[in-house]
Amino acid sequence: MVELKVSESRDLTRIERIGAHSHIRGLGLDSALEPRASSEGMVGQTTARKAAGVIVQMVKEGKIAGRAVLLAGQPGTGKTAIAMGMAKSIGLETPFAMLAGSELFSLEMSKTEALMQAFRKAIGVRIKEETEVIEGEVVEIQIDRPAVTGAASKTGKLTLKTTEMETVYDLGAKMIEALGKDKVQSGDVIAIDKASGKITKLGRSFSRSRDYDAMGPQTKFVQCPDGELQKRKEVVHCVTLHEIDVINSRTQGFLALFTGDTGEIRAEVREQIDTKVAEWREEGKAEIVPGVLFIDEVHMLDIECFSFLNRALENDMAPILVVATNRGITTIRGTNYKSPHGIPIDFLDRLLIISTQPYTEEDIRKILDIRCQEEDVDVSEDAKVLLTKIGVDTSLRYAINLITSAALACQKRKGKVVEMEDVSRAYELFWDVKRSTQYLIEYQSDYMFSEGTMGEEGEGSMMVS
């Protein structure tokens, strides 16, 4: 059997920027899965959030692998926000992969391969292994530097102790470098992995808590380890099936994880990996963590993709599929047939459908309050009332877009707080869909290739939802 390579994935620090859904922190449910009126950035949509909370609970308990959920509703009713809330509620351990339906058609690989990679990104493998670890409190580090530079490598001694024993270890150049890199000093409690030589600082010993060293508030104090210095410890790695696929598909495959240039992965590689993972499961070395794959704009997929999804959902190792669409009864891409949401009936039959409703005036006001906070804009009460009215008459997205525009208008007149005049200025500068459509109907003869006709018939044909 081929020996599989598994890489440890690390979180990189990301630069956070304000986006359309950067204020979402979760689904805003209490412990009984009841939705709060406004919590974790979520407002309104109580029924949809409650349903999403039930799905999240089932995901956490590992009960609904291979199921699919559809978030259906008008544009601007918070479908993506609910999906983001689900991702945040599920936690770091459970994989969450996100994909837009239109992305599949711009990738340099077949649609089914792109979907398969997305599926495997959403399935985690929790691998347990036992390692030999030396764990103790550093008593002393002695490093002997050679008299002549470059003549010989550094050597040294490390004294470690537990509550029961104390031992001196000889250090080589690599270990000295590692200790220096981690700024290990006497009084630190460290763990050394015997196989890899990796050093982990667990914290400072409580016995050194009264030292007069300059310590920051982030300094963590731990007890001096007891028992023997050398212990066997169980280490858990969490990786996705896709990461294992990429690492095993080519030499230096782990570099492809960083560049994103994964290419198509052969079916034989996946079969070998699935067999090996099944073996690990039987031996108790690993367990499967089904995650969530979210596909936005699912109506953009064609009939081939839907056929693939039908088949893939029946697989033993399928994640929970969450799809979203804002279409009504429309043509299924790749066919001449019409269907609800642009999804074939046989696939629609497998879906649990969560419907989202238009926001009320009160909900729009609360969302605008949250967005003003998120974008760090001070808005007066009158201006918020006007923005809410604009949101009700036009759309929530248009009202949200006006916040920053009004803030810039306020900045121009050297004001501190956004007033009604700033919102009115932004409203005059930037048109919403209704006003733009009305203008097109009035002046359509001045535009090229206009298919509308003047009068009532033209107004009907140019209607927007």
Image: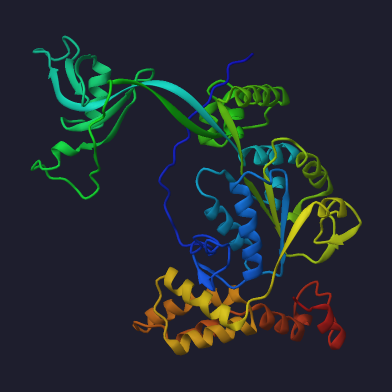
Residue drawn at x 56%, y 62% is 32
Q: Please say which color scheme the image uses.
A: rainbow
Question: For this view, does 451 lie left or right of residue 265?
Answer: right
- 455 up-or-down from 208: above or below: below
Q: Name the image quarter holding residue 325.
A: bottom right
The total number of labels drawn is 0
Residue drawn where x is 61% and y is 80% of the image: 431
Q: Nearer the viewer, residue 61 or 15?
A: 61
- How far across and how far down the image is residue 30, in percent? 52, 64
Where residue 145 sits in the image (x, y, percent)? 12, 16
Q: Would residue 120 be visible to someone looking at this image?
A: yes
State which quadrant residue 172 falls in: top left
**185 w.r.t. 419: above or below:** above
Left or right side of 173 for 338: right
Residue 419 lies in quadrant: bottom left
Q: Quadrant of the C terminus?
A: bottom right
Depth order, front residue of 311/455:
311
Q: What residue lies at 62% left-to-right and 48% top-to-bottom?
A: 59
With 226 as the anchor, is 269 left or right in this view? right
Residue 207 vs residue 127: left or right? left
**Is residue 98 at least partly visible in the picture?**
no
* Residue at x 62% of width, y 64% of height: 49
Query: Residue 171 appears at what percent x and percent y?
Result: 22, 15
Q: Nearer the viewer, residue 459 or 285?
A: 285
Could you say where residue 296 lies in the image, as x and y percent from the top left?
67, 55
